[in-house]
Image: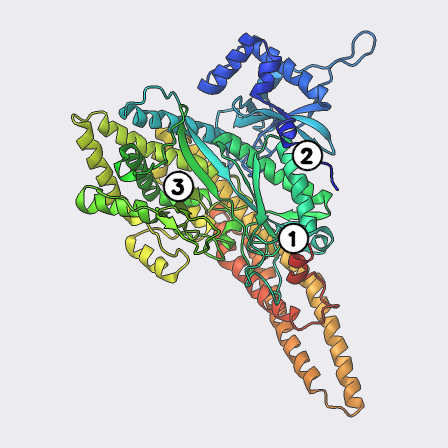
Amino acid sequence: MSELINVEELFGVNVFSMAKMRERLPKNVYKEVKKVATYGGELSMDTANVVAKAMKDWAIEKGATHFTHWFQPLTGITAEKHDAFVSHPDEDGRMLTEFSGKELIKGEPDASSFPSGGLRATFEARGYTAWDITSPAFLKESSCGKILCIPTAFCSYTGEALDKKTPLLRSMEVLSEQALRIVRLFGNTDATKVTASVGAEQEYFLVDKDLFMQRDDLMYAGRTLFGALPPKGQEMDDHYFGVIRERVGAFMKDLNEELWKLGVTAKTQHNEVAPAQHELAPIYETANIAVDHNQLVMETMKRVAIQHSLRCLLHEKPYAGVNGSGKHDNWSITTDDGVNLLDPGDTPNKNIQFLLVLSCILKAVDTHAALLRQSAADVGNDQRLGADEAPPAIISVFLGEQLDDVVRQLVETGDALHVKKGGKLKTGVKSLPDFEKDATDRNRTSPFAFTGNKFEFRMVGSADSVASPNTVLNTIVAEAFCEAADKLEKAKDFEIAVHDLIKENFSAHERIIFNGDGYSEEWVKEAERRGLPNIKSTIEAAEALTTKQTVDLFAKFHVFNKTELESRQEIIYENYAKTINIEALTMIQMASKKIIPAVIKYSRHLAETINAMTTAGVEPKVEKALLKDINSNLEKMQKALEKLQRDEQKAATVEGAKKRAFFYKDTITKDMAALRTPADELEMLVDKNTWPIPTYGELMFEV
């Protein structure tokens, strides 16, 4: 049996939390840190030096040798440069350690080697990292040893945000400022801050290391570019919430322990719908900490998987024809005196503050649907949205029967006089208790669903950072709050004005509400009739970043300037083209060096068998038919391969990031599909011992 784990003792042991600061810092220093972390501002350098020494001493006591400013550039993952605590030896040659307040607060990484969309050129290399005092420092354990990681923001020498965190922090401040105006209107004078809370559920696949290493596509692209479906997939629904396999369970146990050490509140684990697919869900946290922790979750999953001779696949669609992986972004907003602004209470029809907040969110989502869609767009997610348990590319809002009924009453009559109740759930078994059921069912086909006291944004891709969607959510809702507060603060009769505004918002934006089957073809037609955008690809979605509406929105609240938005759009075009290029080159390599030679080898074996049978006086009808079928698909595959190779050469000559991205989307991806089709047919015809790469069945079931 494995040794028992005391979670309470384990949790946060590698985190320099506020509790540890309280223990190690002088009272006046701790108070200043707490004040800046809560209300903003800057630490004095004297205070920063004291904090830095305490942090260094704690880290060294725990075995750390280096520190790093841990940041999140526009690659979508994290970055770190390690510096040792060592200083100049003293007169006796003894090594001294040091870590100053200046080193804690500011770093200077190279800003030209990260994606910048033109913000930084190679000769403009200076960038700065700035300590995010609201997110605690932590120790990361790896083959490098123990490294003190200091969460930071990353900006250029000229001040533009070069990362995911800076705009998120800006948006959180804006949301708090505007939400406070709303709660003040309802008489709340105690709240001083409104915080966006996030819980990011993480879906992932596991695959055996040895099988992974035999697949060039998994190694280079993170997803399979060839592969026929196995006889059994997910159609029996037996994997979802099923008994966790021993090998996977051992991985999950170690994963939880590593995350708990880092202060990540990993709570729920289970098998997902597809074979070898799983999920981990944390408890809600402040948005920027949730973003940091989700990055740690993904990094730790990959590291722990290696320790178990597994590989963790975070790509949104590693296998065609089975469920993709998402990252459900659960978002809510709460005052610092404990009021969840998305809690409808027992009588939501009478909860005027909640109805105003809800109406503002509907307005925000409808007004900026294209921008919200863009915030969840990436190359891998193009493979997932609209297929296999994933929301469609159409933004809509699910409210459920109870709230939908309240909204309809307000729109049609101006008053919501009654509210639907859940009632009793009776099982019909005497030994089982009857219990109160919720007034509303759930809808997993909705991209933006209300789930009791929060919204669940289900569009986000499994490999993506949750920083961008939450930056957009915070900002668009802040705008709606601002516009509501501008009206209501001037109103002579607040009760009439707020009632009219709620009805106005619901009436104007009712089209965004949809409680039906988001997977259905009927919904696609209905959404078009309603005028809702259906943006199917990442590069089409990117256009939403630089519309006048978007530029004005972010400029008004100082979350992004126009240059920062243009740079991000440019990066999307570049990343799309580079990603598809890597996939195309990988397919060319696999087809020309592995699959086609293997098929030719098997064809030669068949031909020899046919000749031998003919010589023996046996008519080889089956063998001839099989050889003919193989040669037909082989010919198709060779033609498709040659076309892909020609178009790959053309792609290199297309000028302009946007044009090149669209060439890859409109031409190269179609060439890739044309190459895959006959290859997958051949997999079903060629002898298993001859087929050169592990099959879907092996990848998904041999874990």
Q: Residue at x 67, y 79 (%)?
A: 626
Looking at the rendered structure, the kind of residue marked 2 is Ile
Residue 396 visible, this orientation: no
Decide which of 107, 405 is in the foreground and name it: 405
The earlier-in-sequence mark between 3 and 2 is 2
Q: Residue at x 75, y 84 (%)?
A: 610
Decide which of 381, 413 is in the foreground and name it: 413
Determine whether the residue tagged by mark 1 lies in a helix, strand or loop. Answer: helix
Residue ID for mark 1? 218
Where does the image place residue 241, in percent across and percent down from the top left? 56, 52
Q: In terms of image quadrants, where is residue 596?
A: bottom right
Residue ID for mark 2? 5
The earlier-in-sequence mark between 1 and 2 is 2
Is residue 671 left or right of 210 when viewed as pictured?
Answer: left
Decide which of 516, 630 is in the foreground and name it: 516
Determine whether the residue tagged by mark 2 lies in a helix, strand or loop. Answer: loop
Residue 301 visible, this orientation: yes
Looking at the rendered structure, the kind of residue marked 3 is Gly
Q: Is residue 596 above or below residue 334?
A: below
Give the mark toward the camera: 1 or 2.
Answer: 2
Where does the image place residue 572, in percent across and percent down from the top left? 50, 43
Q: Tag on residue 494?
A: none
Where does the image place residue 662, in percent across and percent down from the top left? 48, 52
Q: Tag on residue 452?
A: 3
Looking at the rendered structure, the kind of residue marked 1 is Leu
Image quadrant occupied by the C terminus = bottom right
The 10 Å Cα crowd at callout 1, few under 14, some 14 to 19, many 20 or more, is many
The 10 Å Cα crowd at callout 3, few under 14, some 14 to 19, many 20 or more, is some
Image quadrant occupied by the N terminus = top right
Q: Residue at x 47, y 49 (%)?
A: 538
Determine whether the residue tagged by mark 3 lies in a helix, strand or loop. Answer: loop
Give the mark toward the camera: 3 or 1.
Answer: 3
